[in-house]
Every structure is written in structure tokens, then in C-alpha cells.
Image: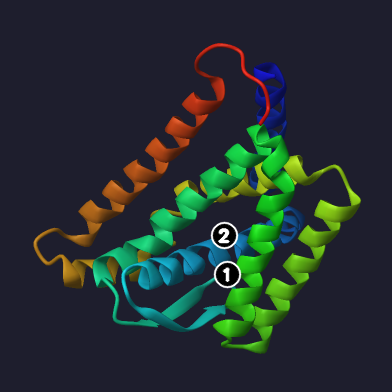
Amino acid sequence: MKQSILLRMILMLALYFGLTYFAGDNGRKILYPIRLFVTFLHEFGHAIAAVLTGGWVEDVQINADGSGFTRSVNGNRPITIMGGYLGSALFGNILFYTGARGRKMVKPMLFLVIAAMLVTGFYWFNSVFTTAILIAFSFVLAFIAIKTNFGSDVLMFLGLASVIYIIQDFNVGPTSDLKAYEEVMVFIPAQVWMYIWLAVAVLLLVYNLRLLFAGGSSHQA
């Protein structure tokens, strides 16, 4: 089974990097939904961090250019801020692991992602574009879960591509979050936090890979 996971991972990485670096504008267009999906994970990470620390979310926005924002009230501000970058890294790793190993959990995970999208799109409504994108994602994921056997591959690719995108984008993507975090944690500059967050994201991926490949033979759950 480990050989199967490794082969799938290599093929997915080849597809992702091939589209990123060798397919030009067409590659960017094909990966555009992944960019929006990463933005969703990022903003959902902010929202969940706010809720878990006693705050509430007013709205969540995903923009056509791949940016986004989450407006929240109260909660623990440092945790809420870091919840975007680190939360999306954590969610991406969970999706990747579930797709690779959690055979019985694939459909429940797909429907959990759909539920998170619909809550974000309707309960935390901000714009028609945001809600429309999340509804479109939800329909596609529901079709995959109900009508196909590709759920594990889709989860694995979404999770792996999201994590790689986050790591690639660390010097640009979390700029506004790092600036806000620097204002809260005044003794450590944003540049230092940037590398701390990157290190955590990389370590999460390394730990995930160790879970998948270390130890003796195992069976799918």
C-alpha cells in the first residue's frame, strides 16, 4: 500500500509542478480552482480559530484574484491571525492523509468539506461571488463523493496541492496576516514570524509523510 501511496503522490506532484512551471497561462487557469480552494482553507482557518477562542465571525470573503479576508469579533487575536496560514496547512494535511489512507473516511470528509463551504457561503455570507464559488465547489465534491470512485484521489490531490501552494506562497500569501501579527506580538518582527510559520507548515507535512510511510505494513481504515 505504501508503494501505491508513493506512486500516487509522485504523479500528483508531477502534475502540479508541471502545470505550475511548464504549462504557462493554461496551467495557471487549470490550477485556478486550487488557488481559490487554498484561499477558502485560509479564511476558514481564521474563522474557526476565532470561534474556538470565544469570538464570532461576521463574514468571509473570497476574491476572484485569490485573495480574501475574514471579519471576526472578539476571540484570541493572535490565534485567530495565525489560524489562517497554519490552519490551512493543517487542513490541507488532513485532506491529504485522509485521501491517502482513510478509505472509509473519504466520503465523510468530502461531505464535511462541503458543509464547511456551505456554512461559510451562507451563514458567513459576504458576497455573491464567494457563495457562488463555494456552491460550485460543493456540487463538484458531492458529485465526486456520490457518483465516482475518485474521492480518495481528489482529497489527496487537493490536500497535497494546497500544502505545496502554501509553502511556495509563504513569502507573499500571508503578508497581511504577518503585519497584523507583528502589531500584536510587538517584540518579534514579521520576518521572523514568517519563517516560524513556514517551519510549522513544513514540519506538519513531514510529520504527515512519516505517518504514511514509517513503521510496518498497515491496512486502510
Label 1 element class: loop
44 sits to left or right of 136: left
Asked whether residue 205 is in view, the answer is yes
- Measured along the vertical axis of the image, is residue 179 above or below residue 92? below
Q: Residues within 10 Å of mark 2 (few under 14, many from 20)?
A: many
In the rendered structure, which amino acid carries the disc numbered 1? Gly
Instruction: Judge by depth and name the residue closer to the eye, 118 or 68.
Output: 118
Q: Which dot marks residue 38?
A: 2
Instruction: Judge by depth and name the residue closer to the eye, 105 or 163.
Output: 105
What residue does disc 1 label?
66
| Residue placed furthest toward the left | 187
Nearest to the eye among marks 1 and 2: give it.
2
Q: Can you give x and y, in whole percent of width and height, for residue 87 in the image?
A: 43, 57
- Measured along the vertical axis of the image, is residue 119 above or below residue 174? below
| Residue placed furthest toward the top | 216
Instruction: Judge by depth and name the residue closer to the eye, 166 or 61.
Output: 61
Q: CA distance from mark 1 to mark 2?
A: 8 Å
The answer to whether mark 1 and mark 2 are in CB contact below 8 A is yes
Q: Can you give x and y, in whole percent of width and height, for residue 143 in the image?
A: 85, 59
